[in-house]
Image (cartoon, helix red, strand yellow):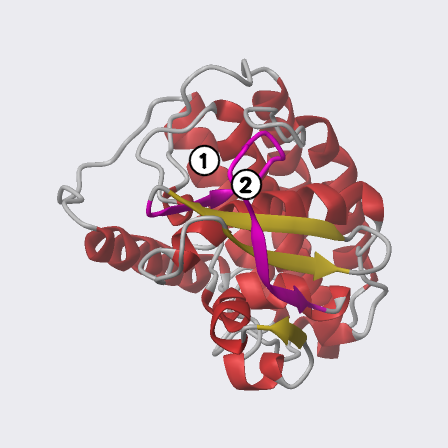
Amino acid sequence: MPAGTPIETAHLFAELDDHLIDLLESLTHAEWTAPTIVPRWNVHQIAGHLLDTALRRLSMCRDGWVPRSDPVRSEDDLIERVNRLNAEGVEMYGRLSPAVLLSLTTTTVAHLARYLASLDPMAPASLAVSWAGETRSANWFDIAREFTERWHHQQQIRLAVGKPSLLTPRFYEPVLETFMRALPRAYQGIDAPDGTVCQVVVPGDGGGTWQVLRGDGVWALDFGVSHTRRTVASVTSLPGAIAWRVFTKGISPLDARSQITIDGDERLGAVILRARAIVG
């Protein structure tokens, strides 16, 4: 993907959330309370989180309703606020019955999809994608980030109840393309000669190959436009079934390491295990 080319996801929200509604409608009482890979959150709580974050985005970004709060002066402040808001939302919507939660979700996600589709993708976003190291982002990147949020939480529910995954090229390709924007930040502070390339491969449908390049003392995604002499130092291959979990803290680095392969420099290839495409 050429540098600067947007990752288009706004048109996929309605379809993704149709899958979510169908999934929630299919759950038994026992499945609503099933544990997930998210510590202390069951299926019902993840569904509540999806409703909460959709309502908060509409309120803040569409309607300009921003409650008073302490200023965010650092990344630690941001993480604390996100974790607190998420915990409050899960507690609040955890009081709703599945039927009420489903009804509210059906209405809310339709409003969210229409709102996101109405935005100019190249205009400045209301929220920056902080996990990519940005303090200002274009709408297309913020929308893509929101898409990965809604996609990976639905995946967590599907994994918990044994429903078919959404690792299809239509959804997984833009999810991974967005997640890989976290690579330069993961490599920040990792020393290597200029021209060093670390390659990440996710084989199979929806996967691909990405490269992060060291140049002028800085790591950046290599979109094939640099003329820097390159040396491929490591090639890290992640199975599609766990790649999304690596970026979303859904698997421990130790467990992930046992399922990936690294050819070349182990130190450089293993950096992928600390890449994060979520806040909190």
Residue 129 visible in the snapshot: yes
Q: CA distance from mark 2 to mark 1?
A: 10 Å
Task: Please tell me which residue is depicted at 18% across the width and 44% down the height of the picture.
Answer: 72
Q: Residue furthest front?
A: 229
Give left or right: position of 119 versus 152.
Answer: left
The picture places residue 49, in percent across and down from the top left corner, at 51, 56
Indicate which disc, 2 or 1, sits on the residue closer to the N terminus.
Answer: 1
Q: Which residue is mark 2?
A: 146
Which numbered disc, 2 or 1, marks the residue closer to the eye? 2
Please state the extent of the stretch shown in magenta in the rendering. Answer: 217-238
Q: In front: 119, or 144?
A: 144
The picture places residue 110, in percent across and down from the top left corner, at 67, 31
Task: Please tell me which residue is depicted at 53% across the width and 80% down the height of the picture.
Answer: 252
Question: Is residue 218 part of the magenta span, yes or no?
Answer: yes
The picture places residue 48, in percent across and down from the top left corner, at 54, 57
Task: Please tell me which residue is depicted at 35% across the width and 55% down the height of the picture.
Answer: 188
Task: Please tell me which residue is depicted at 86% across the width and 54% down the height of the picture.
Answer: 205
Give yes or no for contact between labels 2 and 1 (Cβ–Cβ under 8 Å).
Answer: yes
Q: Residues within 10 Å of mark 2 (few under 14, many from 20)?
A: many
Q: Which residue is mark 1?
A: 57
Q: Of the residues shown, which amino acid type is indicated by label 1?
A: Arg
* Image quadrant in which the N terminus is located: top right
The picture places residue 97, in percent across and down from the top left corner, at 60, 61
Give left or right: position of 83 versus 41.
Answer: left
Q: Residues within 10 Å of mark 1 (few under 14, many from 20)?
A: some
* Image quadrant in which the C terminus is located: bottom left
Residue 100 visible in the snapshot: no
